Amino acid sequence: VQCKPQIVRDTIRLVGWRECDAGDDNWDVAWGDTTAALFRGVQQLKPFQRVNHFPLMQIICRKDLLAQHLQTIRQLCPHGTEEFSFFPETWVLPGDVQRFWGFVRHSFERRSKEDRLHSRDRSKSRGRRSLRGTSADTSEDEEEDSVLTFIAKPRAAARGNGIFLFQVRASDVRAPRNRLKEVLDSEKLVVQSFLSKPLLIDGYKWDMRVYVLVTDVHPLTVYLYTDGLARFCTDLYEAPDEDNLDMREMHLTNFSINWESEAFEDTEDGATGSKRSLRTVLESVEGGDNIWLEIAECVKKTLLAIGPKMQDNYDRYFGRSRDGGGSACFELLGFDFILDEEQRLFLLEVNSAPSLSTPTNLDEEIKESVLTEGFRLLGLDGSEKAKHLERQQQRLADRRNEHLARREELTRQKEDHLRSSVGFLSSLGQRKLPQIFSARQSTQRNAEDTSPTIKAETHEPTKGVKSIPGFVSFLEDSEDETETESEQSEEGWTDEDDEQEEDEEVCEEFSFLGTPVSRNYVQILPVSESVEGIWQEIQAGAAKLAQGWTAARPQSQPLRTSLSTPAGKRSSVSRPSLKMVLQGPKKNPLSQPQMLLQRMRSKELREVLPLKTIQIGV
């Protein structure tokens, strides 16, 4: 469904799948580049079918919603400020303008206090430098400390579109500049504190793209890909000032921005150039394993913070359980991280549709491995589809057998009635009537009278199924095919299984992150129930966050009134607003079968008791 990257089509052939034709309803996976395009193209799902997006995943994939969720979970968790410090200070404008200026004022006041405390140390250091004959030029440091640098991003843009840097001086607190005030008060932006001192490699600023695969929400199942892309700027990094704020190739690591630069270096080894293998880069950095641990913890905390909300959204769309089991969705996410000069990790954003374009050889190698191993982790071997089709055929056969059994019962009742009538007439002295054959006996008698050639050509119907032309032959052929296919699959499965065991390797090198499941994937969620501490606190805070964000849940609960509330005090029970009362409860498409079942039951009740009226209290 609107799948532009060619690597997706190439990867499904490597896995052994094929692209379905238009109108084929027995597909297994529906792939869409965006969530909107996917759910427009897919109207109904069978129990064995899956789609590559979860509903409402934009609650963390939009920059403004990600900031709101993570900042709220900080307040709900007892140690949220420390555990979620990997997310930089963020403001969603224009709603957070007042909070933004409060942060600016507090930052300048804190800097002034620090300058007063260290003024004596600075004077002593200047005296020592003058005695040694060196200049104590600290004008650049003072100028850098006198301003604050921020980065502004559109709420739902991608590929570096609309991103710019701006600075706030101490003088802007009292009288902000017109352009600055106009931007902050009018435009819908997400503003973050800019990391002015990032960790540099070869003098260039860089960030990390990490791939995460989510396969289920009951329970939340997450796999981390132990490689990725390190994306470098194409201009040597300098601290931001008024002269270089507009130099996007120096401050922004987006590939779409630096790819157009003439200084972009495309190498085939993955260890040099403007785009490198993340595993290779972290191996060259001191403490690379600790960085991988921090990445895994940040991914777990971010997804656990929205886990109950994802489960609620999933249940609204697909229900809690499916016929045949298995999740209806999976999703490949792209987490962007950056390190400062002290190797502290910061989360920049989460992408629900990470770029799968392959302009370089490294892109093709990494992304092909991400998709190939990810598709195999889904476990789509056709068994669920075969079971579903088998259940459908079994239902048809059961209905047919019930229909035939009912017809035989009616025929038997008619024969018994005729025999009783003949016996009654014979007892009255009537003449002996000719023998009456039943339907089955007449059929056998007619079959004996037919020629031997026709008898040889006829086929006996399947046991328990009436010989309808085309139906019995289909069942016989399908049974033979299923038997042969099952035998072939059992015989061939052992060979394929042995080959996969020989070819596939498990990344034992990254077993400290979680459970290795393939060559490059490690399972990091679900968290064991025996684990205590911060993970339970995050799950408890996420449950509170989901309850606060669910608007339809209070409507399904009865309105509780407190008769013992003292006079002059307001009751703490929340009452629905007038708008909610007029609109009524939201219609859930999953509850339509239940409504239909209730109507059928009420209809049966009216048929059984036609002369009575039953009134049920509402």
Image (cartoon, rainbow, N blue to C red):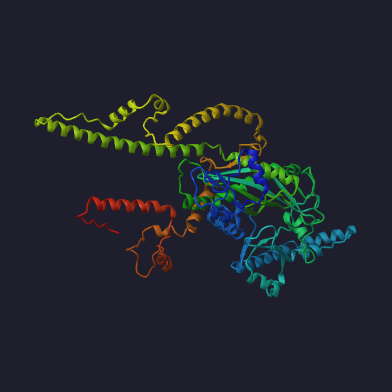
Q: Vertically, is 11 above or below 139? A: above
| Quadrant the C terminus occupies | bottom left
Picture mark count: 0
- Going by the picture, which residue comes out furthest to the front? 451
Q: Position of residue 411 (x, y in %)?
A: 26, 35
Q: Please name the residue shown 45% across and 31% down the image.
A: 476
In the displayed structure image, the side of residue 203 where residue 176 appears, left or right: left
In the displayed structure image, the side of residue 605 where residue 552 appears, left or right: right
Q: Vertically, is 127 above or below 20? A: below
Q: Vertically, is 420 above or below 617? A: above
- Going by the picture, which residue comes out furthest to the right? 133
Query: Which quadrant holds residue 94?
Result: bottom right
Q: Please name the residue shown 29% across and 53% down the image.
A: 602
Q: Position of residue 261 (x, y in %)?
A: 79, 57
Out of 264 and 139, give the one closest to the viewer: 264
Query: Is residue 48 in view from this perspective?
Result: yes
Query: Is residue 294 in view from this perspective?
Result: no
Q: Position of residue 314 (x, y in %)?
A: 50, 50
- Going by the picture, which residue comes out furthest to the top? 452
Q: Position of residue 251 (x, y in %)?
A: 75, 58
Query: Which quadrant holds residue 572?
Result: bottom left
